[in-house]
Amino acid sequence: MELREMGYFLAASQTLHFTRAAALCGVTQPTLTRGIQKLEKELGAPLFAREGGTTHLTALGRLMQPRIEDIVARSQSARKQASLHLRRQGCDLRLGVMCSLGPSRFGALLGRFRLAEPGIDISLSDATPDRLAEQLLQGDLDAALMVQPEAYHERLKPEPLYAERFLVACAPSHPFAARRSIAMRDMDGQAYLSRINCEHRDVLREHLAAAGARLVSACRSEREDWIQCLVAAGMGVCFLPEFSAVQNGLVLRPVEDAPLARQVCLVTVVGRRWSGPLARFVDVLRRTRFAAPVANDQPHAPRALFR
């Protein structure tokens, strides 16, 4: 049974007049009659009976009327939902953000983008690199801002945005705060606050081992904000990407003998057509000039990182 033919049947069952039903459906009366006859053939019996110049539903017609009404209503609802989804998809930007990526470099950019494109609804999803890659490939995200030490999946296209160094974060009261830089060997015996989602954790561990430095584990957490708060409170030190600091009171120092850095990228799916919102966001992102790193001689405080 086709929806068009079911529509003919419902119009005829409401008017009990084939000519008026055809007018309601926008077709000729012979077209409507052929459609209903085809439906009757599929069902195996007449749906209408004509007696004395009048038309009425047969027993089968009365039985089928509510069922066909339900099918047509469900179909119309499905089409409406699909239309709403496609219209909404045209004004959504689903952006993945790596959980260890600080907001300072993108807060101002997203604010400007929102002012320029107020009709676009931005959705931010926080996850690990592996999870972001999975969501991109599944179509759950339009793009992701992320870092991955290993090679990206062959279907993912990374576009470098900026590099950021790994620094040592400590409290203002810590002896490291009085120094201009830190050597890997200086980390030996330090109480360390471990960022579980640090994607360069193994690389940092190798550099520490090469320098003969052994850390003393003080706390481990998936929460970047908690680790930073505990560092500022003097509980220990940690390696921290230079633009990830959001906690007041942090002092950041470069590592003189292991200048490690990570490359932050915009990642999209190769060959996938971009939505309008994504294309406009990428255009703004590409025209953004990221400011150079700011010296970290003073305890960290919020600062503008865009010009």
Image (tube, rainbow, N blue to C red):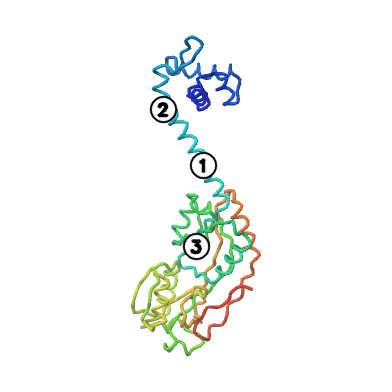
What is the CA distance from the residue labelled 3 to the residue labelled 2? 49 Å
Residue under label 2, please give it. 66
Q: Position of residue 162 (x, y in %)?
A: 58, 68
Number of the front mark, 3 or 2 = 2
Q: Amino acid at mark 1?
A: Ala
Secondary element under disc 2, as helix, strand or loop, is: helix
Residue under label 3, please give it. 97
Q: Position of residue 203 (x, y in %)?
A: 44, 70
Task: Tell me which numbered mark, 3 or 2, is placed earlier along the sequence.
Answer: 2
What is the CA distance from the residue labelled 1 to the residue labelled 2? 24 Å
Q: Amino acid at mark 3?
A: Val
Quarter of the picture holding the C terminus: bottom right
* Vertical position of residue 82 compared to residue 255: above or below: above
Q: Is residue 71 left or right of residue 108?
A: left
Mark 1 touches mark 2? (CB < 8 Å)? no
| Image disc number at residue 82 | 1
